[in-house]
Amino acid sequence: MKVESLSAKDLVVERLREAIYTGALKPGDELAQQKLSEQLGVSRIPVRDALAVLEHSGLVEALPNKRMVVKKITPELIFEDLELRTMLECLIVKKATLRGRASAFEELEQINTEMDRSARENDGVAFKTLNSRFHHLIWEMAGNQRVLRIMEDLWFTMPFYYPVASPGEFFINTGEHWELIKAMKERRPDDAAKIAEQHIERMKQRLMNRLYK
């Protein structure tokens, strides 16, 4: 699909982000300007500028030979990302708890109900998609677009390293979500933030077990 000439750089950024997030572009894949410009139907200038944006956000990197590639994820980067995500997510959850509307809390409940169903059916693909929707909604509830974009970049590096969850892990995940929703609906921001922190810490421990076993 070709992109429009208006705001071409931003549109190329979004297309490349999506390709990286979905795994269509994998760590180490080369991002050649000429090839991308032909695929997307734009000149090389917006492609060049888009790659600079993605390099700044940490999704791509320039090699010594000037080739641009999707950034490879190291254990150090993983834990840096998780540390940053923990700090930001706790603040986001507090803000979302205080300013969230009843309709948003109901939507969180609906998504988590669907996640429970996916867990019972051991449907990992659906579970992953719903989990992303759940957290994205909380970020939106906080109402800060710049933080939203940072969280998206942090979140969508996870497919590169997040260990495959077992059915039991699915239910632990949704159980923590129910606790989080309850605290948010009851307007308990500190409790909600603590639950969010523990949620991420559990994931961190799973990653450590996988990386250093």
Image: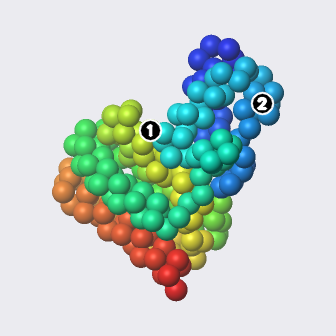
Along the line of sight, which residue is nearer the eye, 109 or 22? 22
Q: Is residue 57 left or right of residue 82?
A: right
Counting the numbered discs, the total is 2
The residue lying at 42 percent from left, 46 percent from top is 151
- In this view of the protein, can residue 103 be seen by the observer? no
The residue lying at 75 percent from left, 27 percent from top is 37
Locate residue 105, reporting x and y percent.
36, 46
Q: Is residue 170 left or right of residue 203?
A: right
Looking at the rendered structure, which numbered label has been put on residue 171?
none
Q: Quadrant of the N terminus?
A: top right
Identity of the amino acid at label 1?
Arg
Q: Is residue 182 left or right of residue 153?
A: left
Structural crowding at the residue carrying mark 2, measured as other residues with C-alpha within 10 Å and reported as few (<14), some (14–19) or many (≥20)? some
Q: Whole-Å distance between the Cαs marked 1 and 2? A: 27 Å
Locate residue 31, reporting x and y percent.
71, 41
- Look at the numbered discs 1 and 2 and tell me whether their residues touch, using CB distance below 8 Å: no
Locate residue 49, reporting x and y percent.
59, 27
The residue lying at 65 percent from left, 65 percent from top is 123
Identity of the amino acid at label 2?
Gln
Q: Nearer the viewer, mark 1 or mark 2?
A: 2
Locate residue 113, reporting x and y percent.
49, 58
Looking at the rendered structure, which numbered label has been put on residue 34?
2
Along the line of sight, which residue is nearer the eye, 97 or 56? 56
The extreme front residue here reads: 65
Along the line of sight, which residue is nearer the eye, 42 or 127? 42
Structural crowding at the residue carrying mark 1, measured as other residues with C-alpha within 10 Å and reported as few (<14), some (14–19) or many (≥20)? few
- In this view of the protein, can residue 135 be seen by the observer? yes
The residue lying at 54 percent from left, 54 percent from top is 157
Q: Pointer 1: what residue? A: 149
- Between discs 1 and 2, the one toward the N terminus: 2
